[in-house]
Image: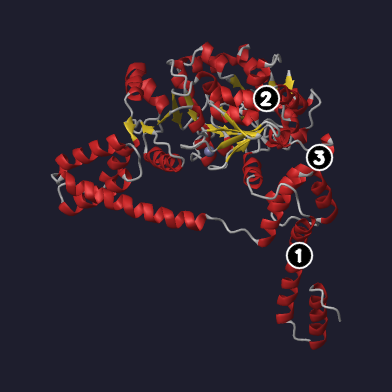
Amino acid sequence: MNITNEMINEIRNKVDIVDVISKYIPLTQKGKNYFGVCPFHDDHSPSMSVSNEKQIFTCFSCGATGNVFTFVADYEHIGFYDAVRLLGNQVGYNLGQAKVIKNKNTESYEIYDKACKFYQNNLNTALGKNANDYLEQRHIDKETIKKFKIGLSLSKTSVTDFLLNKDISLKKLVDLGISNENGTDLFINRIMFPLYDLEGNVVAFSGRIYNTKDGSKYINTKETSIFKKGNILYNYHNAKELLKKNDSIIVMEGFMDVIRASTIGIKNCIATMGTALTKQNANLLKKMADNIILCFDGDKAGEEATLSAITILKEIDVNPKVVRLEENLDPDEYILKYGKDKFKAKIDNPESSIEFLMEQHKNKKNLTDIEDITKYINESLNDLSQIDDLVLIDLTLKKMSTEYKVEYDILKNKYQEIKNNQKQKQVVVSAKKKEKYSQQELASRYLINYMLKDEKIINEVEKKVTFFPNTNTRNLANEIIYYYHKYGILNVADFISYIANNEEELKLFNEIINIKTLSEYNPEEIEDYIKVINSYPVKRKINELKDKLKEEKNPLIQANILNEILSLKGVKQ
Ligand SMILES: [Zn+2]
């Protein structure tokens, strides 16, 4: 069964946000609203308000806002649609097998699904014998082949012909990176490893040679509308089902590493597909598990990837653990060479990221040289100052003190000094961070805030606003207008469901809905905002004309330009 917007709204109408949230945190009623301690930041006083009337929650302190689904999704560390399923099942909808529909891409997913099954089937035919032998020799068993939907590509036009026969256009196949423009297959005689998006849809392939030494070892689907390498976390959809919040997730580089680990029963692995861990990836990982273990390739590149992943994760207050493999081996090679037990022992005893970083600082230093030791200690103290674990900090300082024969108190003081400096810097940064918006952007945001409060303003905006200067703000305004026309009503709680999968839009929405504005709009105020926004194209035009004026030599044309500027400024001539 597919989950539609209408169904989501229906479920939302059947559950009460106050009931649901009060199962998670105690709420007390004050006036119209309910208040509780916010679970999304380190809250000591009840900063979260839950509105029975609007069916949304808002935290006055951290700005978290949302409806009943986004609350449950964020609290339970599950996806939006899983939250819909969870609450839906509680009010009598059986959505257990529900599949998320993304109308725009459904056709592409179906094509990939067909291609994937086609390749899988090839492996089961007589033509697949060599490939099967190869996989067996690489210790990839039948169960693993099935689980990861491994397949086989054959001759020059087989999958293209197969799909053309199913009334799919060649252009579509070329766009999706399955076929070449001349009608041949992109993958020929390769073992096919499907790559999945976060929902588990096959969106690309990586094809490996097996019976020849010619050609690149792997070729991958190019980036397409459904395949963005940076968005992929290989095996995320499987691992997610497996994990509970306090578990560990192991992050590797390649899909082969994940498949290999699975063959020895380690199933909580995902792969970044060789690209640097992105902020988006990091946020997903943080939601998935309490412990993140980085187990990248043992080579120099893997070391650098580890460093960069630590930096990204630290930005969101996650201190990952690190496993380093010897002899430049990747996890796949390591497991093949040393076996299950040795690899498991490594995974069970990862080092802390601080140990890893400190080890890094030892590179290219002579630790019998006093200057190098000083440098090493300072760099390590700097790293230490960025973590919060007091026990780990103290133990590390003590260890350093004995190892390099420096008084503990001196180390502690130096550490404190760095920490204090950092705090000062942070104050400066956060003061700078108080973003300054242009006048037009501020007016746009206030206006959208009122659109969400009163449908009359939606009409006003449609009639009078020519153009919101900022793309994101404009998109949100357009979504609101579109939604309003589609449903004839703008219910904020339902609108949140509507945009819940677009993180950026949801963030902007949160910022806007948290702007403190009057509960009833003042028509003059609205007019002012519209005037400011509409002045934008005029302003741009005036600036362009001014530039032109500066360069123009002909006095007659100069006069014309000047007139145009004056009339744009509204000066009567
Ligand atoms: Zn909060």
Q: Residue furthest front?
A: 31
201 in relation to 468, above or below: above
- Residue drawn at x 48%, y 57% as measured from the top left: 431
Distance (Cα) linking label 1 and label 3: 26 Å
Residue for badge 1: 535
Q: Which residue is mark 3?
A: 484
- Identify the image quadrant of the C terminus: bottom right
Where residue 345 sits, quadrant-wise, is top left
Q: Choose between 554 and 541: the one closer to the eye.
A: 541
Mark whose residue sits in front, 2 or 3: 2
In the rendered image, residue 293, in percent from the top left (x then y), is placed at 40, 30
In the rendered view, does 333 fall on the left or right side of 188?
A: left
What crowding class fits label 1: few (fewer than 14 Cα within 10 Å), some (14-19), or many (20 or more)? some
Mark 3: amino acid: Tyr
Res 71 quadrant in image: top right
Residue 200, can we see it?
A: no
Q: Could you say where residue 371 lies in the image, as x and y percent from the top left?
A: 18, 54
Residue count near mark 2 (Cα–Cα under 10 Å), binned few <14, some 14–19, many ≥20: some
Q: Determine which residue is flagged by label 2.
A: 16
Instruction: Check disc 1 and give the amino acid type.
Output: Ser
Q: Amino acid at mark 2?
A: Asp
Residue positioned 50% across, 17% down in the render: 135
The disc label shown at residue 115, or none: none
Determine the CA span between mark 2 and mark 3. 23 Å
Marks 2,1: beta carbons within 8 A: no
Q: Residue at x 62, y 31 (%)?
A: 70
